[in-house]
Image (cartoon, rainbow, N blue to C red):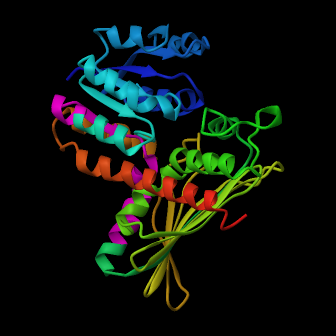
């Protein structure tokens, strides 16, 4: 079978460090034939490696008859519109970086359009596809352990990508030097919403697997220069999401911990923008003993593209309902957390 031709909308660090190398490894399944940027000129450089065409803006790429699969790797606010444009252009499949949409209405429209057209859709929440998370979830199901708490903790070094995320056009006015004034509740709420839908969303589909309902956001804070602390109740489960990004640059930590009625599961994900194999998962039993699961040489970035190949081959169905539920979950949490900040309950 011939490889599927991929056109990539976006030419940022995620495309350069993650998707292009992955697609190069999966040459039997995919071939990059077109890269488009927003006018930066980076597409020309990135297109040289695979020998692809390049353009500015999405129109030329979507009109390219050779492009069968569109990878939407642009800023989050453009995702929904560009997926809809790819569907309208008759493309066979769309890989969309997280988030799929920034509002419930937009998510509904995107899923409805893909479903009606039969367009294959996959959202790149790579942690959900990590082999270590699969093993951790299997452990939870097999032992029927009742989850009591879930925490997702991020400690990240300074990264221009995340700083740009906060300045890509949220419902706030930037302060001096382009930084939002976090002392302004409206600005803080806007920053928090963008961080949850653009960064915490790496893990929210996995959290939803265990804690599928959001009953109440208990607390929500934004921390300078970039960070948050959000706690919410999901049935009988307490969930905490924490991010810190310090100027001194801490060692990267990306950990999901799940405490059940009889043990604790930890999944430590590799730093973003690197290919270092799967996450490391381990279980601590009530007697204090740790059991380490083996790591997989392939990470979630490879796994998600392998899944897309399976979808294109018809080996597995597209889970439109799950994709929509994941999108609603993240948007509802972001809306509720930002509303909590606007209430001024925690300042």
Can residue 298 be spotted in the picture?
A: no
Above-or-below relation of 117 to 337: above
Residue at the image point whose x is 38% and y is 62% from the top: 208
Point out residue 291 in the picture as x, y percentages from the top left corner. Answer: 49, 76
Pick the residue in front: 6 or 94: 94
**Residue 18, magenta (yes or no):** no
Q: Which residues are magenta?
A: 113-139
Residue at the image point whose x is 22% and y is 30% from the top: 119
Pick the residue in front: 155 or 168: 168
**Residue 117, magenta (yes or no):** yes
Asked whether, in this view, residue 12 is left or right of residue 79, the answer is right
Q: Quadrant of residue 112?
A: top left
Pick the residue in front: 270 or 97: 97
- Image quarter in which the C terminus is found: bottom right
Point out residue 89 in the picture as x, y percentages from the top left corner. Answer: 27, 16
Pick the residue in front: 166 or 95: 166
Can residue 224 be spotted in the picture?
A: yes
Asked whether, in this view, residue 307 is left or right of residue 234, the answer is left
């Amino acid at each position: 079978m011939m490889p599927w031709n991929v056109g990539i909308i976006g030419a940022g660090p995620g495309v350069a460090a993650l998707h292009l190398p992955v697609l190069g490894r999966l040459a039997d399944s995919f071939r990059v034939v077109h890269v488009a940027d927003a006018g930066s000129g980076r597409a020309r450089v990135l297109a040289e490696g695979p020998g692809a065409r390049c353009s500015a803006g999405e129109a030329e790429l979507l009109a390219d008859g050779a492009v069968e699969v569109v990878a939407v790797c642009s800023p989050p606010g453009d995702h929904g519109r560009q997926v809809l444009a790819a569907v309208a252009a008759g493309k066979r499949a769309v890989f969309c970086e997280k988030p799929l949409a920034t509002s419930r209405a937009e998510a509904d429209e995107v899923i409805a359009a893909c479903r009606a057209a039969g367009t294959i859709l996959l959202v790149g929440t790579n942690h959900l596809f990590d082999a270590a998370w699969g093993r951790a979830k299997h452990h939870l199901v097999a032992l029927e352990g009742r989850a009591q708490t879930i925490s997702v903790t991020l400690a990240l070094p300074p990264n221009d990508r995340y700083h740009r995320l906060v300045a890509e056009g949220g419902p706030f006015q930037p302060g001096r030097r382009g930084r939002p004034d976090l002392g302004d509740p409206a600005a803080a709420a806007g920053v928090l919403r963008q961080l949850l839908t653009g960064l915490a969303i790496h893990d929210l589909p996995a959290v939803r697997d265990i804690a599928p309902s959001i009953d109440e956001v208990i607390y929500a804070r934004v921390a300078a220069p970039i960070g948050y602390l959000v706690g919410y109740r999901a049935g009988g489960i307490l969930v905490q999401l924490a991010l810190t990004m310090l100027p001194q640059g801490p060692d990267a930590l990306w950990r999901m911990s799940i405490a059940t009625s009889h043990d604790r599961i930890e999944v430590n994900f590799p730093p973003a923008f690197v290919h270092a194999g799967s996450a490391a998962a381990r279980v601590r039993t009530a007697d204090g003993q740790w059991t380490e699961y083996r790591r997989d040489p392939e990470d979630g970035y490879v796994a998600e593209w392998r899944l897309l190949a399976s979808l294109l081959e018809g080996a597995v169905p597209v889970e439109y309902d799950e994709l929509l539920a994941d999108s609603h979950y993240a948007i509802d949490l972001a809306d509720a957390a930002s509303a909590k900040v606007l209430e001024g309950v925690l300042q």
